[in-house]
Image (cartoon, rainbow, N blue to C red):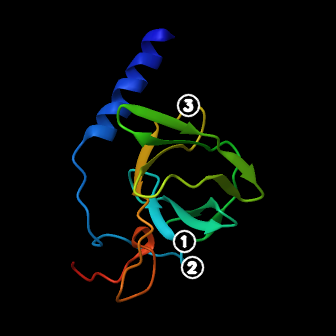
Amino acid sequence: HMQKMKKTLISTLLALTAGFALGHEGIELGPNKGRIIELSSDESMHGEVVEKDGRLHITLSDKEMKPVKIEAQTLTATTGQRSNPVKLEVTVQGDAFTLATPAEGDWLILQFKASAKAKAITARVHYNTSKCEPCSNPEWRCACGEKK
């Protein structure tokens, strides 16, 4: 068990230390104006991340963007600095996973599992809350495609 935990921690740290490309390209907004993240290897599951009451709410949807109920799915969230990753508590409220917002400028690393036995899918969000001038959205939810 310790070996598995070590392996998970190492792969998480590698994911955290991998070079990140910054920019707007590839950001898609969902029906609730939240940021869409890919939670499957075949586009069959998406998450929409919205900020509400100082927390992040992540709802699930299928490839047609139809809502998916949270049943066996799990989500873990890590943030903080590479040298000191911090696990965020994820709770389920109705049809959404909820968690505290990361610190400004931190990366949010989400690991989603469709079921207990499923392989974890990792999604990353750079929590940049500075305002994008052209569209007025915070950068982490900007899909306007304007290059800086």
Three-letter amino acid code of the residue under disc 3:
Lys
Q: Check disc 3: other Cα within 10 Å, few if <14, some if 14-19, many if 20+.
A: few
Q: Say left or right for 68 vs 123.
A: right
- Nearer the observer: mark 2 or 1; the answer is 2
| Residue denoted by label 1 | 65
Which of disc 2 and disc 3 is earlier in sequence? 2
Residue where numbered disc 2 is placed: 31
Q: CA distance from mark 2 to mark 1?
A: 8 Å
| 97 horizontally vs 23: left or right | right
Q: Identify which residue is drawn at 42% across, 60% down.
A: 43
Labelled pair 1, 3 in contact (Cβ < 8 Å): no
Name the residue that disc number 3 marks. 117
Q: What residue is rendered at 65% in x and 63% in y?
A: 54
107, 27: nearer the viewer: 107
Q: Is disc 2 in contact with disc 1, using a CB cutoff of under 8 Å?
A: yes
Label whose residue precedes the other's in the sequence (2 or 1): 2
Q: Nearer the viewer, mark 3 or mark 2?
A: 2
Assign a secondary structure to mark 1.
Answer: loop
Residue found at x 44% / y 51%: 40
Corner quadrant of residue 25:
bottom left
Q: Secondary structure at mark 3?
A: loop
